């Protein structure tokens, strides 16, 4: 046995060699792998081996770059250098892939002289999700094997390709079953005997495909904003050149991506979503959950029940009235049908999921549930009544969760004799689609109950983020502040349609007034009435939305809100001009003009200001947790990384300058968070607080 690095070993078996990568947990192509492979190829040259098999120990082939190296100075050899070294080897090397071969891992395989996939393998180029392109020959060697169109599809989508499809396109040469080492040994022997064809990928030619290139460019032109995809198209188009020219062009475009702020933002988003699973109660063991109770068969309850059924859990759905229960069952069945149509589940799995649903009007049926999620009307008296009943009905050790969006989880827990079992699980609508789950930890919530919340999020395929108790928790508390900023912009002279347009220009899918219409203006109205007793007297208040609701215009559900909805494209509500003019007159406001840039600055700064206070108050554990919430629950553009990543991009000093300037017109709205002022004075960043 030869050891080339801590992660790479080699052995001679007769006339052939085997090279093994063993870098748990996913054999990432870190420095020890790169260094070891380079040394292994040198060893091969003098080994007398007629062929070699490259395989990986553990559950997967090399699954990509080592995230632990993100943001650090790269150590030589680089991955492109390693791939070129593999391809140049005089001893043919056969890559045997199992599990996943993604990004740089797949590029290693493409640089070998033949590729064998094991059953269940998936290959792909996910780099676009990090704002970069395959930079170790993937855009050059891939098209030489498969042609331009399949590689473009894979690299632009970032989605993995099943082995069967990769075989069809020529990205792998064979698909078989077996243990990686044994298959690698057999492949090396066949390559040595001439029974397995080997060749250098770089010596092949890429067939020109201008139709595929043009189609990709046209498609991207319709969705501007991301900078990596057009560069991916350019790089793949360069694969028709000689390999050295193509690799040089790929490297040039890769470095453009690497130096682009979008790359840093997308990497931050990726790392933020990994970090949220780390919480102080990490040593606590989650309680076992097999049956989930859901109280409320409305839109939210339907989504929560669907999400649990899709995850293979048994569900007891409880509603007060039979009619409402029936509507809920029908909606859940429709959701399951949709999942089957999208290929998320088989017909057999759908039948099993429907059979796992028990719908009833009898709350006593929750007695055997391991976890009960209340998704009833957003009123404290309703929540208190339900939890008082649950305290009697639920078995000992059952987790009692509320799906409240704003309300005090401590107050809800206080009506029970077991507040340690109570937690907030704030799902986002539609709950079976949206990835975010705010896990709201009350003062007396037990560590194992917190762990149960995170385990549930993982099982449901959601990103769970720990939040403390306050009005609105992380997301909705911040939302309240930037929604106010938008309302003030309208009072001060901007049209709602201009605000929406400017915010969409930031990269948001919808503007605040479009979103309010979609949700229903009555939702915000009821929440404002709830906050009336606690609203600070210094807070500037706009009555425009209240007047719309009081006139019976509730948004899309009534066909009119900030916009009028018909068969054609929505248009601004003409009644709004008079309402806004009246409110300006009552407040003595002379309207002024705002540019779209001004609107975006105020909207984003208001978001950042409250996000900073959420971190300062300990409601969020880390700044990156805030970013994870907004990326997965509020439509924040992923290529901007999140509000607190943007705070670092803008700089604390500039943010403080803006707020101090605007505070002359509204001291309460634009008060400077203490944490932000310290950063401005000391040169700190939110990234430094992520640890």
Image: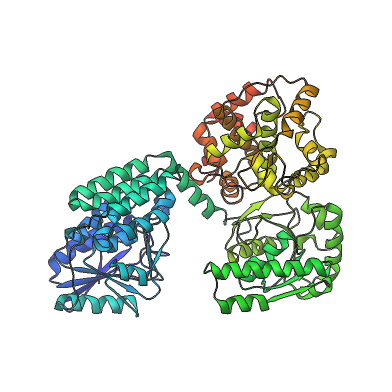
- Spot occupied by residue 303 in the image (x, y as percentages of width and height): 67, 62
Question: In this orientation, which residue lies closer to the viewer: 118 or 66?
Answer: 118
Image color mode: rainbow
Quarter of the figure with residue 91:
bottom left
- Spot occupied by residue 327 in the image (x, y as percentages of width and height): 75, 67
The structure residue drawn at horizontal position 23% and vertical position 46%, both measured from the top left corner, is 248
The structure residue drawn at horizontal position 67% and vertical position 25%, both measured from the top left corner, is 493
Left or right placement of residue 459 versus residue 317 in this view: left
Looking at this rendering, what residue extends furthest in the front direction? 567
The structure residue drawn at horizontal position 73% and vertical position 58%, both measured from the top left corner, is 423
- Spot occupied by residue 118 in the image (x, y as percentages of width and height): 35, 75
Quarter of the figure with residue 249:
top left
**Residue 181 shows in this picture:** yes
- Spot occupied by residue 418 in the image (x, y as percentages of width and height): 81, 63
Quarter of the figure with residue 500:
top right
Left or right placement of residue 275 versus residue 1 in this view: right
Above or below, 602 relative to 300: above
Question: In this orientation, which residue lies closer to the viewer: 581 or 113?
Answer: 581
């Amino acid at each position: 046995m030869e050891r080339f690095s801590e992660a790479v070993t080699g052995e001679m078996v007769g006339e052939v060699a085997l090279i093994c990568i063993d870098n748990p947990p996913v054999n990432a192509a870190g420095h020890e792998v790169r260094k070891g492979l380079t040394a292994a190829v040198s060893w091969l040259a003098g080994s007398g081996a007629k062929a070699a098999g490259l395989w990986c120990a553990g559950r997967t082939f090399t699954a990509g770059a080592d995230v632990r190296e993100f943001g650090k100075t790269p150590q030589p050899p680089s991955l492109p250098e390693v791939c070129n070294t593999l391809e140049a080897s005089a001893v043919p090397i056969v890559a045997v892939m199992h599990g996943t071969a993604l990004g740089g891992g797949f590029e290693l395989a493409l640089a070998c002289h033949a590729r064998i996939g094991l059953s269940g393998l998936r290959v792909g180029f996910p780099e676009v999700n990090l704002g970069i392109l395959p930079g170790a020959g993937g855009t050059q060697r891939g098209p030489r094997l498969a042609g331009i169109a399949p590689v473009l599809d894979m690299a632009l989508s970032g989605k993995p390709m099943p082995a069967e499809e990769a075989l069809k396109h020529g990205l792998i040469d064979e698909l078989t079953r077996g243990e990686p080492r044994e298959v690698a040994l057999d492949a090396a022997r066949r390559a040595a005997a001439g029974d397995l064809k080997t060749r250098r990928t770089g010596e092949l030619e890429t067939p020109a495909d201008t139709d595929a290139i043009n189609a990709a460019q046209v498609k991207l032109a319709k969705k501007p904003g991301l900078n990596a995809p057009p560069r991916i198209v350019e790089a793949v188009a360069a694969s028709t050149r000689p390999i050295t020219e193509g690799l040089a062009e790929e490297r040039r475009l890769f470095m453009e991506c690497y130096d682009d702020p979008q790359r840093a933002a997308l990497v931050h988003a990726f790392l933020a979503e990994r970090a949220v699973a780390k919480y102080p109660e990490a040593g606590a063991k989650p309680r076992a959950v097999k049956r989930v109770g859901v109280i409320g068969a409305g839109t939210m309850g339907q989504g929560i029940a669907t999400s649990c059924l899709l995850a293979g859990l048994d569900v007891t759905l409880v509603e007060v009235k039979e009619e409402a229960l029936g509507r809920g069952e029908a909606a859940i069945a429709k959701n399951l049908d949709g999942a089957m149509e999208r290929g998320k589940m088989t017909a057999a799995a759908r039948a099993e999921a429907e059979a796992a649903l028990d719908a009833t009007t009898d709350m006593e049926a929750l007695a055997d549930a391991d976890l009960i999620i209340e998704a009833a009307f957003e009123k404290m008296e309703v929540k208190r009544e339900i939890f008082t009943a649950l305290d009697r009905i639920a078995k000992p050790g059952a987790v009692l969760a509320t799906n409240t969006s704003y309300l005090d989880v401590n107050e809800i827990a206080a009506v029970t004799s077991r507040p340690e079992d109570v937690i907030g699980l704030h799902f986002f609508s539609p709950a079976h689609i949206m990835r975010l789950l705010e896990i709201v930890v009350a003062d007396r919530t037990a560590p194992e109950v917190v762990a149960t919340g995170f385990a549930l999020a993982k099982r449901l395929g959601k990103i769970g983020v720990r939040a403390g108790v306050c009005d609105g928790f992380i997301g909705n508390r911040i939302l309240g502040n930037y929604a106010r900023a938008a309302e003030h912009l309208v009072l001060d002279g901007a049209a709602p349609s201009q605000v929406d347009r400017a915010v969409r220009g930031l990269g948001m899918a919808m503007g605040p007034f479009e979103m309010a219409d979609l949700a229903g203006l009555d939702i915000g109205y009821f929440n404002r009435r709830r906050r009336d007793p606690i609203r600070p007297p210094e807070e500037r208040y706009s009555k425009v939305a209240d007047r719309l609701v009081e006139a019976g215009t509730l948004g899309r559900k009534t066909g009119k809100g900030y916009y009028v909805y018909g068969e054609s494209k929505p248009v601004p509500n003409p009644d709004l001009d008079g309402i806004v003019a009246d409110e300006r007159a009552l407040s003595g406001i002379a309207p002024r003009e705002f540019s779209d840039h001004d609107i975006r600055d105020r909207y984003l700064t208001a978001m950042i200001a409250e996000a900073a206070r959420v971190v300062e108050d300990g409601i969020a554990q880390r700044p990156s947790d805030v970013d994870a919430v907004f990326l997965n629950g509020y439509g924040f553009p992923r290529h901007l990384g999140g509000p607190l990543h943007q705070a670092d991009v803008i700089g604390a000093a500039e943010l403080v300058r803006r707020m101090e300037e605007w505070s002359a017109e509204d001291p309460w709205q634009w008060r400077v968070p203490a944490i932000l002022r310290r950063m401005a004075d000391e040169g700190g960043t939110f990234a430094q607080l992520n640890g």
